[in-house]
Image (cartoon, rainbow, N blue to C red):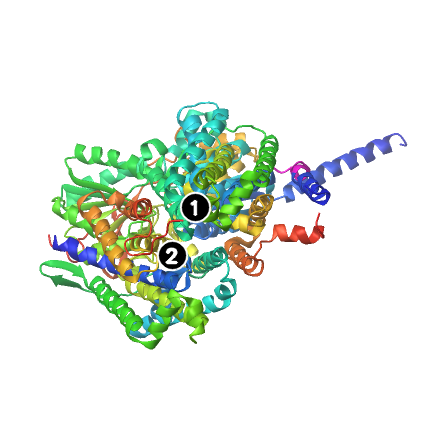
Amino acid sequence: MRRIFPLVASAVFAGGVAMSVQASAAGKPILIGLDTPIQHQVGKDTIAATKMAIDEINAKGGVLGRKLAYVVADEGVDPQLGVSAINKLTSDDHVDVLIGGYSSGVQLAEEPHIARSKTIWLGVGAASPNITALVGKHYDKYKYIFRVNPLNSALQASQIVDFATHVVKGKLHRDKVAILGESAVWVRGLVPVLVKGLEANGMKVTYQQLFDESMTDFTPLFARVKDSGAKYLLVILSHANSDVFVKQLYEARLPMPYGGIDVKSMTPNFCSRVSGAAVGETTVNFITRAPITHKTIPFWDKFVKVNGRAPVYTAPGAYNAVYLYAWAVKKAATTNADKVIKQLEKADYVGVGGKIKFNKLHDDIDGPGYQNLLFVQWQKDCTRQVVWPKSVATGKVVLPPWVSN
Amino acid sequence: MLTVLIYGAVTSAVLAMLAVGFTLIFGVARILNLSHGAFYALGAYCAYSFTTLLKLPLIVSAVLAVALVAVFGMAMERVLVRPLRQSSLAVLMITLTVALTVEQVLFVVFGSQSKNVPAFVNFPINVHGVSVDGQRLLALAIAVVLIGALWLFIQRTRLGSAILAVSQDPEAAQYMGIPANRIFTIVMGLSAALAGAAGVIAGPFLSVRPTMDQTAMITAFSVVIVGGLGSIPGSILAACIIGYSQTFVAFYLNPEWTGTVSLVAILLTLVLRPSGLMGRVVNA
Amino acid sequence: MGKRNMVGAGVLLALLAGLPPLLHNHYLTGVFIVCAIDGIWAASWDFFSGLTGRENFGHALFIGGGAYAAAFLNGNFGLSPWFSIPAGIAVAVVFGLLVGFPTLRLKGPYFALATLASAAIMQQVAINLWQYTGGSEGIYGLDTLIDSSLGFYYFVLAILVATVVVLSLIARSRWGTIMRAIKGDETACQAAGINVTFYKIASLAVSAAFAGLGGVLFAHYQQAVTPDDFDVFLSISVIIMAYVGGIGTIWGAACGGILLNLMLELMRGLGEYRLWVYYVILMVVLFFMREGFVAPLWRRLRGGNA
C-alpha cells in the first residue's frame, strides 16, 4: 500500500497536469487575424461578417471545444502598413489564421511575409491572379495562400464574355462593344482576355481605353465611345470614381446600355447615392439577396439586421472564410497549418455565394454550383434585379430609361 | 470643337477658383497654405451635410457651407498661423497638419464612400448643339462672377486697397495705420470662401471623398506656379492654359495622360521661367 | 563631441541595440527596422534642407529611386540583392543631380514646389510605364538582404549610425559651414568667391545618396516596391520627422524618424482614430515647439553647455 500510494498519487497528479494543460489549451481560443483596411467599407464589412460567423460558431460550441476569437490590424491601402499588420498579427498576436485583403498591390507586398510566418491566409478582397500564381511557382513557400473571394480577374473576364454573348448580343441584340476601364495592372491583364473572348463570340470591340483611377472628367471618353459606333459600353472600375462616372454618363445621356465590373456600384446604396443616375447599369456582384444557396438569404437578412446596412463583397467572403476554416480545422482535428491546408485543398464547401472549391493554385473556382458572378442591374427606383445567369435570374434586363431600342 | 471649348472652359473655371484663393493668400501674406485643399473638401462636405442630413434648402446650404469654411479658415489663421508667422516652414507644417487632420476627420465621420452633393441644375442645357450638363455651366458662371467680384473688391474698395498695400509691404502698411494682422485674417477668409465655393459648386459633378483635398492641392499648385505665385491674373490665365490642355489631351490624345499635364506644366515652368507667366522674378 | 553628448548617444544606442533582442518579437523588430530606415531618410533630408534652409519637398524621389533600382536588379533581373546598394545610391545621386541643376537656383517656395513636382512626375512615370515597373501593383517578391530580422536590424542600425556620423562630420567641416552660410546669405557667399552652385548640388547629391541607400534597405525589408515609394506623403512624413527631431541637428532628425514611426505603430490600438490622434499630436508639437521636440529636450536634459 505504501508503495502503491506514491505511484497512484503521481499518476493522478500527472493526469491532473495533463488535463489542466489540455483544459488551458482547450480554454485558449482559436485566434483569427483580420488584415483589412479598417477605414474603408470593405474593411468594416470584413470585420462585421467575421464577427457574425464567429458568434454563430461559438454559440454552437466552437471548434474542437475551443471558442473562436478575432483580432484586427489595419492594412490601409499602403504596403508598409500592410506588411507591419501581417507581422503584428502573426508574430505579436500569434493568430492561427489570417483573413482579409483588399488592394492587390498591398497583398502582393504582404505575400512573402505571410509565407514566412507559415500562417494560412484566406483572401477575401483582392482579385489579381498574381496573388495565387505564387502558389504554383513556389508551392512549399506559398502554400499557405488561399483565395476564397472574389474570383480572380481572369475568371471574371471569361464570365463577362458569357454575359456579353448571351445578354448583350443575345437579348439586347447589340454586337458592337466599347471598353472603358481604369489603368490598374489587373485591368490590363483582364482586357486582352475580354477582347479575345468577345471577338471569338462574334462581337466587335470598336473602342477601348484605360484611364487613371483619379480621373474625374469622363465626358471626352463618352464622346469617343459614342463616335466609335459602339452599342454597348463595358466598364471595368474598382478604385476609380464610379459615382462621378455614372453621374456624368447619365448627364451625357450616352445612347447605349452599359455595365461590367464596377466595384463601388456593388454597394446597395450606390444608386441612391448618385440620385438614381445609375438606373440601367448592370454590375457584377458576388452576392445579392437571392437564393443562390440555402445560406444566402439568411446571411443577408441577418447581416442587415445586425449591422443596419447591406453587405459589400468582402462580407460574404469573410463569413465563408471563417466557416470554411472552422470546417477544415474540425476535419483535420488540429489547427496545425500543414494539416489544415490538406483539408482546404480538398474542400467542396457550400458557402453563401456558391460552393467553394480551390484549384491547384489555391484559387477559388467558378462553374455551375460554384461561385459565379451575378450580373445585377439597377432598375426603376433603384431596385436591383439579377439578370444573369439564368439559373438565379430574378428579372429581365432593361435598357436605361433614356435609351431607345 | 465646340464641346472642347465649353468643357475646357468649365475645367478652367474650377481650376481658377481653386488657384485664385491659393495665390491670393500667398501674395498678401506669403503663406503657402497647404490646407487650401481641405477648405475645398470642407465646402463639399458641408454642402452635403446641410442638404442631405439637415435637409436644408439648396441655396441656404450653399451659402452656409461657404460661410462656415470662411470662418474655419479665419479661425485657423488667427489661432494657428499668426503665432508662427516668423517661420515660413512652421506655417507650412501647421497648415499641412490641419489638412491631414481634416482629412482624417472626414474619413471617420463620413466614411470612405463618396458622397452625393445635390446639383442646383439637374438637366442638360443645349449650347449650339452641344449638350452640356447644367451644373457645369452654372459652375462656370459662378466662377466668373466670384472671381470678378473679388477683383472688383480689391481694385475698387478701401479694404481692397488695404489688402494691396499689405501685400506690397506689410510694415509700411502698418505704419500707415492699416492693421496688417487683421488683413491677413480677412484674406484667409476670402481665400477659404473661394475654395469652399469651388467645393460646393463642383461637388455635384466631381468626386466627393475624404481624399479629395489631395487632388485639389496638386491642381492648385500647378496653376499657381504656371501663373506666378501671388498673381491673380496669372492664375486665371494659367487656369485656362492648363484647363484647356487637359481637355485637349483627354479629347484628342490619350486620356491616360491627363493627370500628367499639370505636372509637366509645373516642370516646364520651373525650368524655363520659374516666376511663372506673371509673377515676380525669383531666382536665388 | 562633449562628454554628456557621448553618454546620451551611448544610452540611446544601447536602447536601440538592446531592446529588439530583449523583446524577441519579429513584429517589433520589423517596426524598429522601419524606424531606423526612417531615421536614415530624415537625417539625409536634414543634412541638405536643415543646413541650407532650402526645403526639399520631394525627398521621396531619391527614396523611390533607390527602391526601384533595387527592384529592377533583384526583382526583374534576378541579381543578388547586394548589388542593389551601389545601384540604388547611384540612381539616387543621378536623380539628385538631375533635379538639382535646374532647380537649385530657385528661391524659397519655388524650390519646394519644384522638388515636389519632380517626385510626383516620377510617381506618374512609375504608374504609367507599367510594363517595366509593374504599374500600381509594383514589383514584389524581392529577396531579403539578411534573412534574420534581428540580423538585418543590426545591419540597418549600423548604417543609420554611420549615416548620422558621416553627415554630422561633413556638417561640422568647412563644407557644412559653407552650407550654413548659404542659408544665411547666398549672395555674400558668392561675392566671397565660394562656388555656391557646386556646394548646393554636391550637398543635394550627398543627401540623395543616403536617401537612396535607405530606399534600397526598405525595398529589401518590405520585399516589394510600389509607386507609393515616390509619394508626396512620404516626402512630407520625412520633413515632419526632421522637424519634430530638430531641424539642422541631423542626429535629432534621425531620432524624430525613429520616434514618429514607433508612435504610429504603437497607436494601432486606437483603430480608426489612429491617424486623427497622431495628426492632432503633431499639430500640438508643431505649434508649441518651434525648435522641434527631441533636440531641445535633450539640450534641456543635458543642461549647461557640454
How crowded pointer 1 is (Cα within 10 Å; few <14, some 14-19, many 20+) is rated as many
Check the image and name the residue furthest to the front.
C192
Q: Provide residue A309's location: percent of width, then percent of height.
A: 40, 58
Front of the two marks 2 and 1:
2
Label 2 packing within 10 angstroms: few (<14), some (14-19), many (20+): many
Circle 1 residue: A77
Residue placed most toward the observer, C102 or A106: C102
Examine the structure image and report whether residue A341 is included in the region drawn in magenta: no
Left or right, A209 with reference to A308? left
C262 vs C132: above or below = below
Residue with the mark numbered 2:
B213
Q: Residue at x 74, y 36 (%)?
A: A15
Q: Quadrant of the N terminus of chain C?
A: top right
Q: Amino acid at mark 1?
A: Val
Asked if the magenta segment contains residue C25, the reply would be yes
From this view, report whether residue C108 is shown above or below residue A5: below
Label ID, residue A29: none
Residue extent of the magenta highlight: C17-27
Judged from the image, the secondary structure of the residue bearing numbered disc 2 is helix
